[in-house]
């Protein structure tokens, strides 16, 4: 997440940006060649599955090697993203839920790392309290309360006022998928071959967000892109004391009933979504999963199971497409 105000580009940088530098042209051509090699499988799945590089999963949660995740620093000097995968973070009686979170820090990594360690625990506590009172879960209240407590925790510490983090989290149960989003990370569901957005990016130029910011006395300034007070490129986050009350930590919550047509879910920071569309991301994951399924069925039990990690493939593709940010991706297989 780009947080700090950028200085004006020099004339040499401007020349490179418009393609007058032979070095930048060579880099661009090399990236395009890399991208074309990676995307070839979309038109010919059989050939690509045998030729493309095989990645080992970065996190193995069960025998099916899913969910998988991948995080890369990209072209940044510091890794400010964090991911959280907590299987059965709630496991009581008939209530069993898995938790997934992607946190995109800005100004530093401390808030993102704090969210990784604490947010699922705060939510589990809220669910436990709710369960004692009712069987019907009010997911919006649960998420809003958990995010508010997370924001309160980080703002009561010695963390610098300018440090914050986006948060997109998903809770997956037998009957529902609940997504809470605060910032411009994103969650996308593939259902029956169709990408279904599970969150809406919080950008300062979103009409309802712009109105909220201005009503609270803030301004959106075009400084190397539209930013709250010319500083932050997202309109909601956890932390960021110096930008309150204009930047808030209240998430938007979407509850989806599970469907037999559900295939997988992608959660990722904007380092992915800045250069890859929802549709393309779903195509990539679907091809990886289809290839993995075919290989797994043909293997003998004593052979080592290998698979292309679709999360890692997406991070590689985003870098090939020129993403300049940290990139973090979680892919959750929803087929039952």
Image (tube, rainbow, N blue to C red):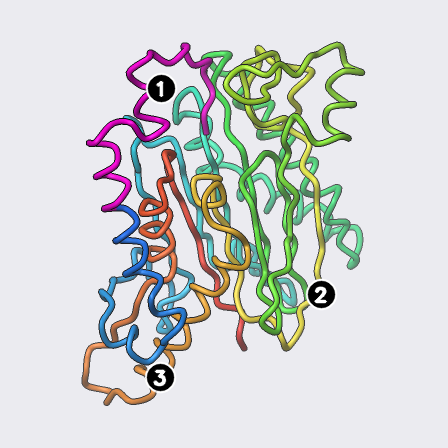
Q: Work out whether residue 134 or residue 80 is closer to the camera in this orientation and state it.
A: 80
| Disc 2, SS | strand
Q: Are marks 2 and 3 in contact (CB under 8 Å)?
A: no
Does 279 appear above or below 318?
A: below
Q: CA distance from mark 3 to mark 1?
A: 48 Å
Magenta segment range?
1-30
Name the residue carrying label 1. Answer: 14
Which of the pair 324/216 is nearer the observer? 324
Q: Earlier in the sequence, mark 2 or mark 3?
A: 2
Residue found at x 40% / y 65%: 66
Instruction: Give the numbered dot on residue 257.
Output: 2
Query: For residue 68, which quarter of the picture?
Result: bottom left
Helix, strand or loop under label 1: helix
> Which of pointers 2 and 1 lies earlier in the amino acid sequence?
1
Residue at figure coordinates x 48%, y 47% from the top left:
268
The image's mark for residue 294 is 3
Callout 1: 10 Å neighbours few (<14), some, many (20+)?
Answer: few
- Please report the residue visible at 31 percent of the width from the left and 19 percent of the height from the top: 13
Q: Nearer the viewer, residue 303 or 38?
A: 38
* Residue 14 lies in the magenta-colored region: yes
Residue 80 screen position, x and y as percent: 38, 31
């Amino acid at each position: 997440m780009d947080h700090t105000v950028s200085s004006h580009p020099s004339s040499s940088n401007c020349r490179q940006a418009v393609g007058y530098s032979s070095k930048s042209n060579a880099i661009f051509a090399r990236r395009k060649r890399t991208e074309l090699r990676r995307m070839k499988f979309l038109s010919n799945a059989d050939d690509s599955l045998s030729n493309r590089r095989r990645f080992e999963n970065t996190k193995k949660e069960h025998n099916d090697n899913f969910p998988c995740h991948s995080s890369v620093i990209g072209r940044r000097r510091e890794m400010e993203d964090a991911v959280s995968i907590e299987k059965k973070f709630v496991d009581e009686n008939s209530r069993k839920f898995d938790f997934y979170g992607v946190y995109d820090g800005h100004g530093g990594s401390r808030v993102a790392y704090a969210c990784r360690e604490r947010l699922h625990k705060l939510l589990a506590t809220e669910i436990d309290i709710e369960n004692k009172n009712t069987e019907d879960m009010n997911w919006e209240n649960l998420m809003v309360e958990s995010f508010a407590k997370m924001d309160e925790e980080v703002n009561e510490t010695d963390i610098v006022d300018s440090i914050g983090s986006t948060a997109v989290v998903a809770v997956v149960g037998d009957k529902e998928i609940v997504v809470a989003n605060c910032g411009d990370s994103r969650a996308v569901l593939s259902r029956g071959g169709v990408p279904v957005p599970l969150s809406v990016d919080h950008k300062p130029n979103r009409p309802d967000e712009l109105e909220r910011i201005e009503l609270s006395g803030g301004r959106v300034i075009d400084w190397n892109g539209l930013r709250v007070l010319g500083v932050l490129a997202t309109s909601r986050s956890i932390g960021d004391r110096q930008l309150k009350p204009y930047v808030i930590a209240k998430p938007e919550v979407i509850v989806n009933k599970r469907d037999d047509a559900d295939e997988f879910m992608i959660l990722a920071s904007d380092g992915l979504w800045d250069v890859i569309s929802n549709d393309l991301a779903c195509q990539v994951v679907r091809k990886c999963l289809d290839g993995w399924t075919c290989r797994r069925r043909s293997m003998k039990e004593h052979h080592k199971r290998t698979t292309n990690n679709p999360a890692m493939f997406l991070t590689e593709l985003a870098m090939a497409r020129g993403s300049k940010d940290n990139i973090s991706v979680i892919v959750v297989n929803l087929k039952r």
